[in-house]
Amino acid sequence: MATPFNAIKVPKPEAGAYNPNRPAGLLLQAQALHFRAALLKHQEELTSLLAIDPKSLKTEGDVSAYVHRTTAILHTHAARPKRK
């Protein structure tokens, strides 16, 4: 199957390019802040969903909305299948 875009080959970094003891640069620190913000969003969603007692869901619409919201969160955490 052909890809709909042109793949860009990225060379592997040189040996020793990663130093776990080197101070983090501003880009890495900014990425960490963005990840934290994303996690907080999920925490708020999870807290609101966990506050719902599934036994209180009486209609198909109630259950459908609940399943839609929970599946959207869980789907983002699912392992992606390996490409062949």
Image (cartoon, rainbow, N blue to C red):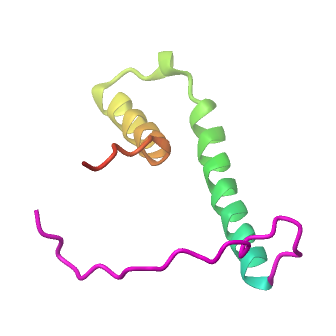
Q: Which residues are magenta?
A: 1-25
In the picture, measured across the screen, residue 50 lies left or right of residue 7, that is right
Using residue 29 as the reference point, say whether residue 23 is left or right of it: right
**Residue 64, image quadrant:** top left
Q: Is residue 29 left or right of residue 50?
A: right
| Quadrant showing the N terminus | bottom left
Q: Residue at x 73, y 72 (%)?
A: 16
19, above or below 67, in the image: below
**Residue closest to the far front:** 15
Residue 54 falls within the magenta-colored stretch: no
Name which residue lies at 66% across and 39% down: 47
Magenta-drawn stretch contains 24: yes
Q: Nearer the viewer, residue 35 or 22?
A: 22
Residue under the point 63% across and 77% down: 14
Quarter residue 61 falls in: top left
**Main SS type for the magenta part?**
loop
- Residue situated furthest left in the rendering: 1
List x then y, in percent, for residue 60.
Answer: 29, 26
Question: Whole-percent x and y of residue 30?
Answer: 74, 77
Residue 53's spot in the image, x, y percent?
Answer: 56, 22
In this rendered view, identify the residue nearer to me: 13 or 69.
13
Residue 41 vs residue 29: left or right?
A: left
Q: What residue is at 44 percent from the left and 41 percent from the top?
A: 79
